[in-house]
Amino acid sequence: MQTMEKATQASPAAPAGHRRDGRRTHFPWPAWGFWVALAWLLTAPLGHGAGTNYLSWKDSRVSADIQSWDLSQVLERITAETRWQVYVDPEAHLEIQAKFKNLSVSQALGMLLGNLNYALLPAAGSGAKLYVFRTSVHEATQLVKNPVKSGDKSVIANELLVALKPGSKLSAQELAKSLGAQLTGEAGKQGVYRLRFTSEEAARTAREALAGNEEVASVENNRVFTRPTQMDPVALSSLPGLNLKPAGPANPNQLVIGLIDTAVQAQGARIGDYLLPSVSVAGNSATDPAAPSHGTSMAETILKSMSQTAQGKEAMPVRILPVDVYGNSEETSTFDVARGIWSAAEGGAKIINLSLGGEGDSPLLKKIVAEAHQQGIVLVAAAGNEASTQPMYPAAYPEVISVTAGDRKGQLASYANRGDYVDAMAPGTSLVYFNNQAYLVTGTSTATAYVSGYAAALSSSTGKTMAEVEQMIRESLSLKKSP
């Protein structure tokens, strides 16, 4: 899953090659009243040609000579050439003939996509997103796979997580020195230490040596969690503002939501009054003052969900505790996510939102999740955006409410993960505001934030225990398990 953030503010002008008209579209959410609003209706120019199946994308100039390709073939080729994230309406179909040379991107998309609509959301490097659809952008839910993209490797090859036995007389520094490793992190209360080696081979040798050490309880790999994808600026939006206020000053009786994510910005966002002092397990983070971080967007989505679920109740005794597990890095790890969960629990969180995830089980992360759940904490995590049944962690742990994304009819979004480990479904799209600019965020990360907000609203409005709230969510938001 892409968790995972730097955003660029949009120009108010629509991109060349298509028009924009504002239109409000409501998504009534069955059973508990979620509303997601999108305000786009985009149209694209017509164009056809003839050719012999060739498409080249070089230096923002496009050439094609296509005799007969269907839409999926063209979008796969665009994905391979540009490394964009391309989403398509599953019901969109098109047979494409086109012949042109050295056209601009906007001209080429118009020629290739014919009477289909599209929205190209620019970003630095290869982070742009292209949405292709029939009538409205929210129909573009199916992620087009890159046919030449190599698989991601989740294991950090030159690192180990080593747990010492309770009462061990061996210090972490002594352990690292004896193995020729660098001690880069520690979860002292759990007796777990993060060791970095000079190479994969050195880590492998150390693991063999630790197998016979009586002071060592366990050894495991550290795994990568990639940084959440960036927010996409929106040129037009008719979405109403966030209508929610904190219920009085912070106090010991308030409900705390732990947000394990990138750094959350208090300035420029509409959520500052809800934020507790942030915690970082990954060092200082330099956020972009011109655009929302992923953490900021998740915080606003949580509050939006609370407002919608509360049905007009403006004040709630809730605060958000931001826990930054990314810092300035493009990735985090199971070690820091585990530390983040522990920090949120120590900070009094009763709901922990994890709009992130990665492949591969981690005994340390599993242990921390189980301990938090035993303390009565509701944990909510993203199922992933790979359109597969591959378990993502921590979502796949039984103590966690695993959330996927779906549409207003209760159908899974085509990009969203599914499978027996998935517990709930919620809207996968949210519009958030930062410095009076609207941004679009999509994925199971967003769906997770909606469920966390729903849990907070249920707890605040009903007075039920967190265990009862968790059971209500698992029952009311469940979905038919997909094979």
Image: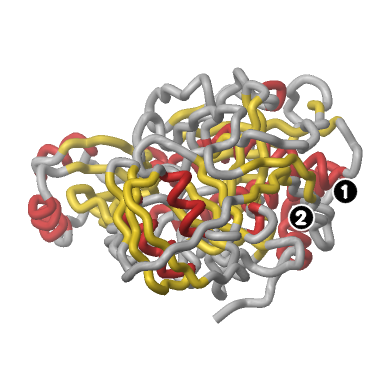
Q: Quadrant of residue 295?
A: top right
Q: Is residue 133 above or below residue 338?
A: below
Query: Does the CB distance between marks 1 and 2 fall below 8 Å?
Result: yes
The answer, for residue 335, to whether it is visible in the render is no
The label on residue 469 is: 2
Q: Residue drawn at (40%, 43%), measured in percent from left and top?
A: 104
Residue 30 in the image: state x and y as whole percent: 82, 62
Under mark 1, the amino acid is Thr
Q: Residue drawn at (71%, 22%), measured in percent from left and top?
A: 273
Q: Which residue is mark 1?
A: 462
Does 472 sit left or right of 386 as displayed? right
Under mark 2, the amino acid is Val
Q: Residue drawn at (60%, 60%), measured in percent from left and top?
A: 115
Does 361 sit left or right of 445 as displayed? left
Q: Is residue 196 or residue 225 the one in the foreground?
A: 225
Which residue extends farthest bottom?
483
The answer, for residue 214, to whether it is visible in the render is yes
Cα distance between the residues tagged 1 and 2: 9 Å
Earlier-in-chain disc, 1 versus 2: 1
Q: Quadrant of residue 214?
A: bottom left
Question: Is disc 2 surrounded by few (<14), some (14 to 19) or many (20+) residues within 10 Å?
Answer: many
The label on residue 141 is: none
